[in-house]
Amino acid sequence: MHEARRYCAPVTKRALITGITGQDGSYLAELLLAKGYEVHGLVRRSSTLNRSRIDHLHGTAGLHLHYGDLTDGVSLSNQLRDIEPHEVYNLGAQSHVKVSFELPEYTASTDAVGTLRLLEAIRAAKLDCRFYQASTSEMFGATPPPQNESTVFYPRSPYGAAKLYSHWVTVNYREAYDLFAVSGILFNHESPRRGESFVTRKITLGVASIKLGLTDHLDLGNLEAVRDWGFAPEYVEGMWRMLQHDEPQDYVLATGIGTTVREFCQYAFAHAGLDWEDHVRYDKAYERPTEVDALIGDASKAQDVLGWRAQTQARGLAELMVDADVEHLGRLVRHKRELGD
């Protein structure tokens, strides 16, 4: 009599995302759930809920939220031990550059030491997992473009400096402890889910507000800063691809095209049939103590090794964000009028 064969169901991949309620975290959660992952997200405990970007995922099979904080090493260790993830995506951060000048110590504790706490918790638990660190083009700072994986770093803000620590400590844990740890050096990537204080979303919300007659002007700072703006959903696909590769390496993700804030304004206002010069006002309060003049990435390595390429450029990005904000504000206005009636 032959021994009965044993069949084992395939193991469902588990992913842990810090910063799951942010722009990138919400898109990454959607991507991983669509791929059949069991997704665990860390959320900070606060008196008010801030989960609007993932509200539509509420009740989705395979999604689990846990309280945790990058400033609390014990909570990180406990969650890693309980979840035992196959992949960890560290997207949690204080990510606003100008705010980092006002909250430098908090930015360092969250963005720099927070990464160390997470890596050390993985190492101490001897987890067999792959780790993604969300690095940033702000680490290049004053170094002239184009910037790639070999470009010298020269951060110009507490945010950029904190992220640079995270970048190098990720490299160190990879080399010292043989962890599968990678850093994705992502250039600016935006979407309708971008925070309202970031310049691109501030512009598109301003355009929508002016288009709907809610205001008549928009205050901005440096219009000559050059950035490499892409579409966030495409960039989280790149994050995932980095962790699927056989060898842990660091990659730049970017469009390779530089656009000034002024040009982004022109694209956004023109799409709504408006002249930006009639509505934009300069306000020195939005200037940073030290400015980064130009960030333009070279993503050749990601294209060659991962097969990743940005599809959406700045003009198309501005237009889709304006459309989304016109619809969003229009819906709010109609709702308010209905309540008034």
Image (cartoon, rainbow, N blue to C red):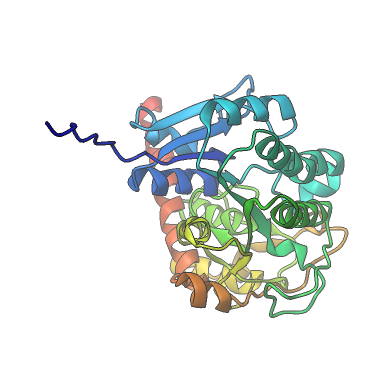
Q: Residue at x 43, y 33 (%)?
A: 55
Instruction: Please state the horizontal and vertical placement of residue 318, each as a whole percent of the image.
Output: 50, 65
Q: Classify 111 as above or below 147.
A: above
**Relative to 127, is 106 on the left or the right?**
right
Q: Residue at x 83, y 41 (%)?
A: 103
Residue that extends furthest to the top in the rendered view of this protein: 47
Q: Classify 235 as above or below 45.
A: below
Q: Classify 241 as above or below 100.
A: below
Q: Quadrant of the N terminus?
A: top left
Q: Quadrant of the C terminus?
A: top left
Q: Residue at x 64, y 37 (%)?
A: 126
Instruction: Please state the horizontal and vertical placement of residue 241, each as a whole percent of the image.
Output: 47, 60
Q: Quadrant of residue 114?
A: top right
Residue 187 appears in the picture as rendered: no
Q: Residue at x 63, y 23 (%)?
A: 45
Instruction: Please state the horizontal and vertical placement of residue 105, each as a whole percent of the image.
Output: 86, 40
Q: Nearer the viewer, residue 186 or 249?
A: 249
Q: Nearer the viewer, residue 178 or 101?
A: 178
Residue that extends furthest to the left in the rendered view of this protein: 1
Instruction: Please state the horizontal and vertical placement of residue 219, each as a whole percent of the image.
Output: 69, 56
Residue that extends furthest to the front in the rendered view of this protein: 1
Residue 225 appears in the picture as rendered: yes
Q: Quadrant of residue 280?
A: bottom right
Q: How many marks?
A: 0
Q: Nearer the viewer, residue 182 or 267?
A: 182
**Relative to 146, is 271 on the left or the right?**
left
Q: Nearer the viewer, residue 146 or 264?
A: 146
